[in-house]
Image (tube, helix red, strand yellow):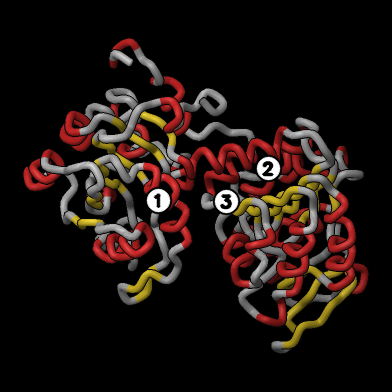
Amino acid sequence: MLDGIPTLDDIQYSGKKVLLRVDINSPIVESRILDTTRFESHYETLKELENSAVAILAHQSRPGKDDFTTLEAHAEVLERIVGREVEYLDEIFSSCVIKRVKRLKPGEIVLLENVRFYSEEQLKRSPEEHANCIMVRKLAPLFDLYVNDAFSASHRPHASLIGFPPVMPSVAGRLVEKEVKALSKALRSEGRKIFILGGAKIEDSVKVLKNVLENGIADKVALTGVVANYFLKLSGFKLGEENEKIIEENKDGVNDEEMKKLLEKYKDKIILPVDVAIDANGEREDVKLEEFKGGMIKDIGFETISMLAEEIPKYDIAVINGPAGVFEEEAFATGTAEVLKAVAKAGYSVVGGGHIATAARLFGIARKIDHISTGGGASIRFLSGESLVALEVLKKYWKSPSRGL
């Protein structure tokens, strides 16, 4: 058990039929999968289940998006990674799928179709309501065990994530276990902690900021990116119409007055930039905030970079979520790259999912980081102190008398 979450250590799975939920949702351009990181993250779980008969549930994108497609290419990638045949079935719970699963033998793997092709998958329902949907009623009787290894989707109340635990034995896979251990260590272990929050999603960073400051978790919080610009504006700095427009577009759900009070209360713990880098006709120009007269802010400035590069390695634990600037543009990648290097020098380093994880790999820093989360939204919620619905349902129904466990 891991914080009350049952894992593969708590159940017999060898020789059993296992329904495995993974998250291999990946960027796709012209039918080509561009990043296989999420596929690789499930290797340990799939390796451990090599003596089980495994059917995989997964999703790709969502309706209306250009990359909302079948999982045929995903099966080919999985096959290369696990080194075994992964048979793709182009349906989810049809009679053909049911017949194939009934014939499934230990050592075999089948990948079922994109679960988001099923109309009830994304309906907002309780676990008990989802347990009564057609997909769960059709698939659950075919399997001995359900395993959730999709940490990055575990904050979503979707049928394939929360519908099976109420009606069958269900545990977390090794990736979920790894994520929970690493993120829990970042929040709960002893030692001095610094959190570096950046990117454009102000509401997400504010949730983490409030949790780690109000609960005495963080010794310091450094702000970068649009998040920092927002707090600089609250501090009285005039950042110009174009920057303030970006702030307004990204601060839904955030209360200015509440954040002003938070900033005042924790001013000794919050680190704000002292300079910024602007786009001056395509060139980088570093400007001290006192001398700022306008221009699109695309990175923290060199003085701020130097300050953080010296400060961050002093801590026992450093957690970073969100880039410091527009790292996709070479001229404005310095802040994100140097802050990541500093995070890697801390006693224990954690990188949140999403763009900052992409940046860590892009700059060749990933191998120096202790833990890179696979989940953007899920890791944010975990670091914010919020529960993840797909993990909570595993706790709730473990050894439920109604299932005879």
Real-space Cα distance between discs 3 and 2? 15 Å
- x, y percentage for residue 261? 82, 39
Corner quadrant of residue 36: bottom left
What residue is drawn where x is 29% and y is 26%?
Answer: 129
Verify CB contact (< 8 Å) between mark 2 and mark 1: no
- x, y percentage for residue 203? 63, 48
* Image quarter of the C terminus: top left
Q: Nearer the viewer, residue 320 or 367?
A: 367
Q: Earlier in the sequence, mark 3 or mark 1?
A: 1
Q: Amino acid at mark 3?
A: Ser
**Residue placed under numbered mark 2 in the picture:** 208
Figure check: 398 above or below 210: above
Between circles 3 and 2, the one closer to the viewer is: 3
Is the residue marked by circle 3 packed among few (<14), some (14-19), or many (20+) residues within 10 Å?
many
Figure check: 84 above or below 293: above
Is the residue marked by circle 1 packed among few (<14), some (14-19), or many (20+) residues within 10 Å?
many
Real-space Cα distance between discs 3 and 1? 13 Å
**Residue placed under numbered mark 1 in the picture:** 23
Corner quadrant of residue 169: top left
Between circles 2 and 1, the one closer to the viewer is: 1
**Residue placed under numbered mark 3 in the picture:** 373
What residue is drawn where x is 61% and y is 75%?
Answer: 328
Left/right of residue 299 with respect to residue 154 in the rendered view: right
Real-space Cα distance between discs 2 and 1? 24 Å
Corner quadrant of residue 88: bottom left
Left/right of residue 289 with respect to residue 195 in the rendered view: right
